[in-house]
Amino acid sequence: VEKLTVIDTWLRKHRLIYLGATRHSFVISIRDGTVDFSGFKIWLGQDYKFVRAFVAFVASVLIKAWKESDESEGDTEVILSGVAALNDEIAWFKKEASGFGVQLSDVVQEQPNRDYCRFLEGLMSPEVEYTVAITAYWGIEAVYQDSFAHCLEHGSNTPSELQEACQRWGNDGFGQYCNSLKNIANRRLEKASDEERRKAEVTLLSVLEHEVDFWNMSHDGS
Ligand code: HMH
C-alpha cells in the first residue's frame, strides 16, 4: 500500500473545508449555467486586484526557494514559470474586463479581498519558512484549478462567454503545474519539523477560508 503524502492526508482530514472552497455555490452556478453575469464581473474586477498582490507573493516564494541552497534549483524554475504565467494572466484580465465592460481603474477592492491580500503580505515576510509559503502557493492555485476544471467537466453547462475564464485555470497544463507545486510542497513537508508542518497546515486552512470569502463577494447568500 502506497503511503499517502502529507497533502493528501490533509485533503482527507479537511475534505469538507476543501470542497467548500472548490465547490462553492458561485462555481456551481457557472457550471450549471445559472450564474449571474453581474457576479462574474465583480469576480473579474476583484480578482484582477488580487492577482496584482499575488504576483508579489509568488515573487517572495521565489526568493525563499533561491535562499535554500539544497535541491531547490528545480523549484526556482517551476516558480519562475508561475511568475511568467501571471504576466499573461494580467494581460488576460485587462482584455476580459474590456470585453465585459468592466473598468478596472474604477474597481474598489472589497474587504474580503483586502483581508486576503493582507494575509499574503504576512506570508511574504522573511520569517515565514519556504515550506509554509510553497504550501500556501500550491493551495491558492489548486483551488482555482479544481474549481474551474469542474466547470469544464462532461455534463457541465457553463455559458460560452465564461468558457475562456474556466479554461485559463481548468486546463490540463495548469493541472500539471499545480501538481509540480504539490510535489515540491510534499517533498519539503516530509522533511519538515512537526512544528513547521503544523504551521503549513494552519496556513493552508486559512487559504481555503479566504478563498470561500472571496467567492462570497460574487455570490452572496449561498
Ligand atoms: C482568489 N485565488 C484567487 N484568485 C486567483 N487568481 C487565484 C487564486 C489563482 O489561482
Image: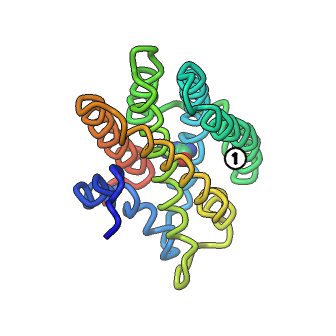
| In this view, 183 is above or below 52 | below
Report the side of 26 relative to 152 (left or right): left
Residue that badge 1 annotates: 97
| In this view, 132 is above or below 9 | above
Q: 16 or 45: nearer the eye?
A: 16
* Res 129 → quadrant: top left
Report the side of 72 relative to 222 (left or right): right
* Res 54 → quadrant: top right
Q: Secondary structure at mark 1?
A: helix
Quadrant location, the C terminus: bottom left
Q: Residue furthest top?
A: 126
Q: Within 10 angstroms of label 1, few (less than 14), some, or many (20 or more) residues?
A: some
Give the image location of residue 206, x and y in percent. 31, 38
| In this view, 77 is above or below 117 | below
Q: 123 or 115: nearer the eye?
A: 123
* Residue sitting at x 53%, y 70%: 151
Give the image location of residue 80, x and y in percent. 68, 34
Give the image location of residue 1, x and y in percent. 31, 70
Confirm if mark 1 falls within 8 A of ligand 1.
no
* Residue sitting at x 56%, y 33%: 71
Q: Amino acid at mark 1?
A: Ala
What is the tally of numbered marks visible in this picture?
1
Give the image location of residue 72, x and y in percent. 58, 32
